[in-house]
Amino acid sequence: MNPPAAKLPTPALTGPQKALRKLGLLRPIDLALHLPLRYEDETRIVKLCDVRDGDLAQIEGVVTACEVRPMGRRQLLVTLDDGSDTCTLRFFSFYPSQQQALAVGKRIRARGEIRGGFLGRQMLHPAFKAADGELAVALTPVYPSVAGLPQAYLRRAVQGGLARADLTETLPPHNLESIGPGSRWSLREALFFLHNPTPDVKLATLEDHSHPAWQRLKLEELLAQQLSQLQAKRERAGLRAPELKTVHQSADGGLPLPQQLLSALPFVLTPAQRRVSEEIKRDLARSVPMHRLLQGDVGSGKTVVAALAGAICVDAGRQCALMAPTEILAQQHFSKLIGWLEPLGVKTAWLTGSQKAKERRQMLALIASGEASLVVGTHAIIQDKVVFKNLALAIIDEQHRFGVAQRLALRSKLDEGDQEPHLLMMTATPIPRTLAMSYYADLDVSTLDELPPGRTPVVTKLVSDTRRDEVIARISAQLAQGRQVYWVCPLIEESEALDLVNATETHAQLSAALQGAPAYRGAPVRVGLLHSRMPVAEKKAVMAMFTGGQLGVLVSTTVIEVGVDVPNASLMVIEHAERFGLSQLHQLRGRVGRGAAASACVLLYSTGDASRLGETARERLKAMVETDDGFEIARRDLEIRGPGEFLGARQSGAALLRFADLATDTALLASARRLASLMLDQYPALVDQHIARWLGGKADYLKA
Ligand code: ADP
Ligand code: MG
């Protein structure tokens, strides 16, 4: 037996090593899969007499002048003569060492964009080096990097990774013609090519990723995503969950709980609500855990669908938990569900972070004993101390607002013996089809595609900030009719304090402006204020007063964004609408138009910004005015933002697609999907290899 190895001190990481780590480039394969953003052509030297204005070129010549000039701003001007013509290299910042390297008489190569100017040809801040050594034989890759990680270091690291990585094929030895132009390249060939392309390649095909080598890489990436999700789906199919079936008649001869709930509701379900409820009911009755996403536009009535699912669960003698992203939202659900279910004898518990210790203890006891069969709350629900007696269904509202880690915690927490709970996730941000096929391939999706009847569409208007007076007149008119109004201020990201000042000021201004307004319900108008820094109890109190109708106007930062339901509110004013995201604007707008009254949404933009209103801000506001349809909004939002931001938290970790672009690679996505099911059926060993290569230890994130 060998003596135990002496414990060596772990060498400290150098700056560039730390930077590699930060980029997630740990294994040789990670380095090999770190692909260039673009390339520079150092394989050729171009004669100055042959270049045109705007060309990116490498030139070589002798320095004939080198001087620092204080013209306006200090700058270094270097004249380079290549025998055919001269060119001025201009540097606005430079080190003495660079100045030496560019001394008169030195022979150098410089790379950059050539500009023909008043003073003759010039290059601004070109890359340069001494003209010794051979010319490169391949294009020089430029990699995505971070501060402290020079390209030269990264290039060596990538080449090293490429040499050491295991690049054996993980695609099956199958007829791969159908997967497109990448099929004739092996992974090894594709990677070597992309890191060292020969100069004869059409650069544009590398840059727009249409080159077959790129196609091959994109297919591999999409395949990893599909495999990990379909695998998760199949694994789940092997798990067991409690079968939640409604008994047709309860012991005392009464109707089953879901039926009782239906007959107690003040409305009948829309056909869409009936359809999705059936889908959920079927899932719950199976012994495999449900993993379903319920998507429906704001106001489409998801809560009652959740309540029905809960009723099925409770009827079967098991516990149901409903988790919402904010305390206000949880509170709303709680009062709604209590209103519907407590009269039917269902005991409900309430859990949030801000709860008093005593109340919390009582709630925990109710949950542990099983006395409470329905538990509503915030992420407090997933904390360690919470022990359920027999949880069988977890419902997550606004699922995209929860981080991946939280969703994972929920699932693992609910792991009970050999059984898993059913999971119903709800979202008001509909997922466009391509995203559903890629990022959400492991989910079953139910869609509420119609709104309850009697809603009047919300009219949306873009109004300049200079017309505030008109907006205030409009508010007074609504109040005079006994209606209520939201006024939303943007969250100022950099500073919560500023945020508060902003909301507080608006609140004061509005209160003053509405002083002389006609009475609201026979009393002076009261304006409430709600912002993120208020203590929870205060927030709740203000919200309750607005819901109860005592407050005519509610000034708020985006805490009211999701789920708040006050049907009497008929006007929403959004200040600095240009600062909000599209989905967010749509969510906000969904707070009005919930009753029978004609409702409106006023998007105030600041004229100061109007001329400079960014292109994307303009597109967002335009989309808001043009459509009220959540699916259309989601589609445009995806177009404007791209999938990364659109998906938000689901993508933390390595789950984001780096290479494939869902907007253009739909055909590849379809191929990857076909290939994934074939591999899962016939080549399980390759599946594991492929997932490990592409996702490393991060595959779990995709399954959350
Ligand atoms: P969301 O899908 O945005 O969560 P909610 O569940 O809050 O929507 O429902 C919005 C409003 O519509 C609520 O006041 C709810 O009671 C009401 N509602 C839900 N379903 C119906 C229906 N079938 N008919 C009439 N009103 C309904
Ligand atoms: Mg809701």
Image: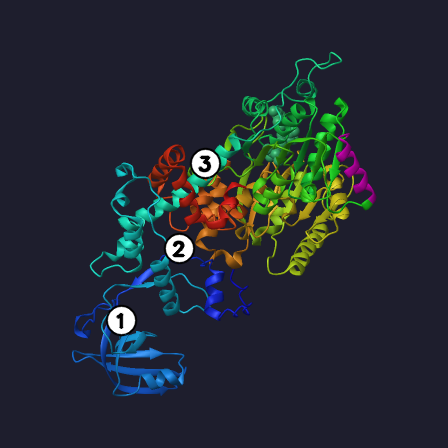
Q: Residue furthest top?
A: 253
- Badge 2 crowding class, 10 Å Cα cut-off, few under 14, some 14 to 19, many 20 or more, is many
How many marks are shown on the rendered structure?
3
Residue 192 percent across, percent down from the top left: 29, 56
User: Residue type at mark 3?
Assistant: Leu
In the image: residue 444, left or right of residue 499 = left
Looking at the image, in which quadrant does ligand 1 appear? top right
Q: Which disc is residue 29 wearing?
A: 2
Asked if residue 26 is positioned above or below residue 445 in the image, the reply reads below
User: Residue type at mark 1?
Assistant: Ile
Q: CA distance from mark 1 to mark 3?
A: 51 Å
Asked if residue 297 is positioned above or below residue 608 in the image, the reply reads above
Q: Is residue 389 magenta?
A: no
Q: Tell me which label, 1 or 3, sits earlier in the chain.
A: 1
Residue 283 percent across, percent down from the top left: 56, 25
Q: Is residue 363 magenta?
A: yes
Would you name the residue on which mark 1 appears? Answer: 114
Give the residues drawn in magenta, as a range: 358-371
Quadrant position of the C terminus in the picture: top right
In the rendered image, which quarter is residue 171 located in?
A: top left
- The verdict on label 2 being within 8 Å of ligand 2 is no
Q: CA distance from mark 1 to mark 2?
A: 38 Å
Residue 404 percent across, percent down from the top left: 56, 46
In the rendered image, which quarter is residue 29 located in?
A: bottom left
Would you name the residue on which mark 3 appears? Answer: 230
Front-most of 168 and 394?
168
- Badge 1 crowding class, 10 Å Cα cut-off, few under 14, some 14 to 19, many 20 or more, is many
Q: Tell me which label, 2 or 3, sits earlier in the chain.
A: 2
User: Residue type at mark 2?
Assistant: Ile
Query: Which residue shows up at 71% across the image and 26% down it?
Result: 340
Asked if residue 277 is positioned above or below residue 6 in the image, the reply reads above
